[in-house]
Amino acid sequence: MKLICLLTLALLMGFLAGAQKFTNQQPDNPTKSKAPTGTHQLSCEVEARHKIQCGSASISSSDCRDINCCHDGHMCYYGKCVTLQCTKDGQMIVVVARESTQPNIDFESISFHANEPRCRPVDATSAFAIYQFPITACGTVIMEEDGVVIYENRMSSTYEVTTGLYGAITRDSQYQVLLQCKYAGFSTEAQVIEVGQVPQPNPAAAPGPLNVELRLGSGVCTTKGCVEEDLAFRSFYEDSDYPLLKVLRDPVYVEVRMPARTDPNLVLTLGRCWATANPSPHSVPQWDLLVDGCPWVDDSYQTTLVPVGPSSGLLYPTHHRRFIFKMFTFLSTVVNNSGKGGATDPEVRSPLTRKVYIHCDTSMCQRLFENNCEPTCFRKRRDLVRDTFQNTYKYDSTVVSSLEIQYKELN
């Protein structure tokens, strides 16, 4: 998708007057302000019949440009972009041009962080959609930094995904921006930022190969009544502890994490997790632990998924995945042909090796709405229907493996 307008930034010095509907009425003009640096050039080639007035009818051309609108010498109007205005009485007004993207965005696919009835357009034409709602509605998040109150929402578009044997594609525009209204004293700043262009918190969050670690929890219960699963992931085995020795059916606590990312909207996802008798993830035999992120149903001792939420104490819970499986050993098959008349006796199975290695196919997922990026075993049926048009983007995949685990026999 090509974004015609990558970043719209309107700095409004002084509050806008109370919000009014766009049909035949506009908010009062903001006072003139210095145009922010780094603002991308607007596309002002809007047909006369599609022009929607921006600001009051008497606004000057310079003031019109200062609020990132276009002026043709007679009228101030919205360009082919996404424009945000934050009003004195606490309203967000968002004007979206269909030609904000190439191919053009489908207005029906647009939604905000929370889909409430009042988050739908208050007016629309064939070229523009107009939204207006209280700054605390539609899932807006409120933050405060150095005396500045920030109201942040997220506007996204869904897209249809077509999946083949070896990949997935879409032919729809994919669009996601952050909308921020910043209130400080008697000044307001309205900011529209394309997600993906947002500066990362530090270099560790910069784009790059997916760095994933697989480690095994070593915590144990030492007091009566404690829950081992709650303590198992509080400490982890070091490389010097391997090979680990486990009794058959002992729980093995597995955590997969991406330690070098600091974007809270990224979610680590697990596809298939499996075990092998050799270090190579492609070796055979293999035994599935998770399939599509869910416990393999044909295992009589099914793997247990461990939710990782805010109560875990982790800074970025979505960057961690945890599960538990029961220790096992691979078996070889030996056919005994010593029976009379060349008859073949039943198969005799014996341990193939005492070694087990764990592997997981992982990827990063961009979370756009609550509960996205979760495996289907966590979702209700009505959520699965949305998968065809789900606002989820998965990228960067890699396979991560454990060191050697061995089973031991009790004497």
Image (cartoon, helix red, strand yellow):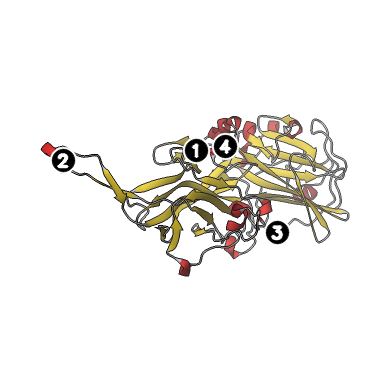
Real-space CA distance between mark 2 and mark 1, rounded to the nearest whole angstrom: 61 Å
**Amino acid on which the number 1 mark rests in the picture:** Thr
Badge nearest the viewer, 3 or 2:
2
Q: Nearer the viewer, residue 121 or 141?
A: 141
Name the residue beneath numbered marker 1.
170
Name the residue beneath numbered marker 3.
37
Which mark is on residue 193? none
Badge nearest the viewer, 2 or 4:
2
Badge nearest the viewer, 3 or 4:
4
Look at the image and tell me in which quarter the C terminus lies. Answer: bottom left
Name the residue beneath numbered marker 2.
339
Real-space CA distance between mark 3 and mark 4, rounded to the nearest whole angstrom: 35 Å
Badge nearest the viewer, 1 or 3:
1
Q: Which of marks 3 and 2 is nearer the N terminus?
A: 3
The answer to whether residue 146 is left or right of residue 125 is right
Q: Residue pushed farthest left?
A: 341
Q: Position of residue 113 (x, y in %)?
A: 69, 41
**Amino acid on which the number 3 mark rests in the picture:** Thr
Badge nearest the viewer, 2 or 1:
2
Real-space CA distance between mark 1 and mark 3, rounded to the nearest whole angstrom: 34 Å
The answer to whether residue 100 is left or right of residue 148 is left
**Amino acid on which the number 2 mark rests in the picture:** Gly
The answer to whether residue 149 is left or right of residue 406 is right
Q: Residue pushed farthest bottom?
A: 240
Residue count near mark 1 (Cα–Cα under 10 Å), binned few <14, some 14–19, many ≥20 = few
Q: Earlier in the sequence, mark 1 or mark 3?
A: 3
Query: Would you place residue 46 above or below residue 240 in this image?
Result: above
Q: Position of residue 161 (x, y in %)?
A: 50, 36
Confirm whether residue 261 shows in the render. yes
Which mark is on residue 390? 4
